[in-house]
Image (cartoon, rainbow, N blue to C red):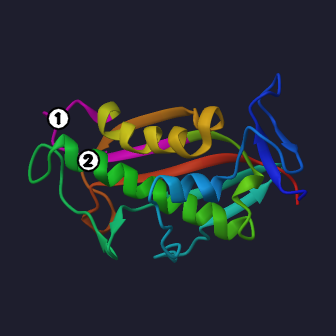
Amino acid sequence: DGRRTLDKRSARGKRTRAGIGKGTIMIEEKLAELGIILPEPAAPVASYVPTVEANGLLYISGQLPFVDGKVITGKIGDSRTLADGQLAARACAIMLIAQMKKALGGDLDRVERIVKLGVFVASTPEFTDQPEAANGASDLMEAVFGDAGKHARAAVSVPVLPRDATVEIDAVVKVQPR
């Protein structure tokens, strides 16, 4: 059918054009398998654009953790737990994927690799498990994109985030040309 797919047999694990065949997983099918329905991508809240595609990379502005249309708020170590932080990071990852889909004209199979996530965790000075909170996003990217979802990452503590969000995540994604 000519759709872009991930061919797990490829020596380099790169995306290839493949016809109907065995061993291919479409990203939309993977999302459905995981029970994920992508929300409408969040509109910018200030003077910036949500995504910029340049030289084969898609840069995605920081995304907040929306669940049922509301931002998960509060600091980990205060009103929020590590588990809450992981849920918030997962929600940010879902919004990142929604932004990818919109930026790529609905074709998530153009995603070649999640290159890097920048994870900002609102937490108290005593809380030091930011990497574990960030795993909520990292684990989802790997579950959705397979090996192409494995990425470099920074996970840092911040005293406060926009809208009192618990987590904010930005991303760099390698994409196939149109």
Q: Indicate the position of residue 1 as horizontal and vertical percent values.
A: 89, 59
Which amino acid type corresponds to the residue marked 1 in the rendered image? Phe
Q: Indicate the position of residue 78 as horizontal and vertical percent values.
A: 9, 48
Q: Secondary structure at mark 1?
A: loop
Q: Which mark is residue 85?
A: 2
* Residue 4 located within the stretch drawn in magenta: no
Q: Quadrant of residue 160?
A: bottom left
Nearer mark to the viewer, of 1 and 2: 2
Q: Indicate the position of residue 52 as horizontal and vertical percent values.
A: 70, 61
Q: Residues within 10 Å of mark 1 (few under 14, many from 20)?
A: some
The residue that appears at 73% across and 37% down in the rendered structure is 23
In this view, 52 is above or below 23:
below
Which amino acid type corresponds to the residue marked 2 in the rendered image? Gly
Q: Quadrant of residue 128?
A: top left
**Reading the chain from its start, which is encountered first: label 1 or label 2?**
2
The residue that appears at 51% across and 67% down in the rendered structure is 38
Magenta residues?
117-130
The residue that appears at 46% across and 76% down in the rendered structure is 45
Name the residue furthest top: 11
Q: Secondary structure at mark 2?
A: helix
Q: Nearer the viewer, residue 128 or 150?
A: 150
Q: CA distance from mark 1 to mark 2?
A: 11 Å
| Residue wearing tag 1 | 127
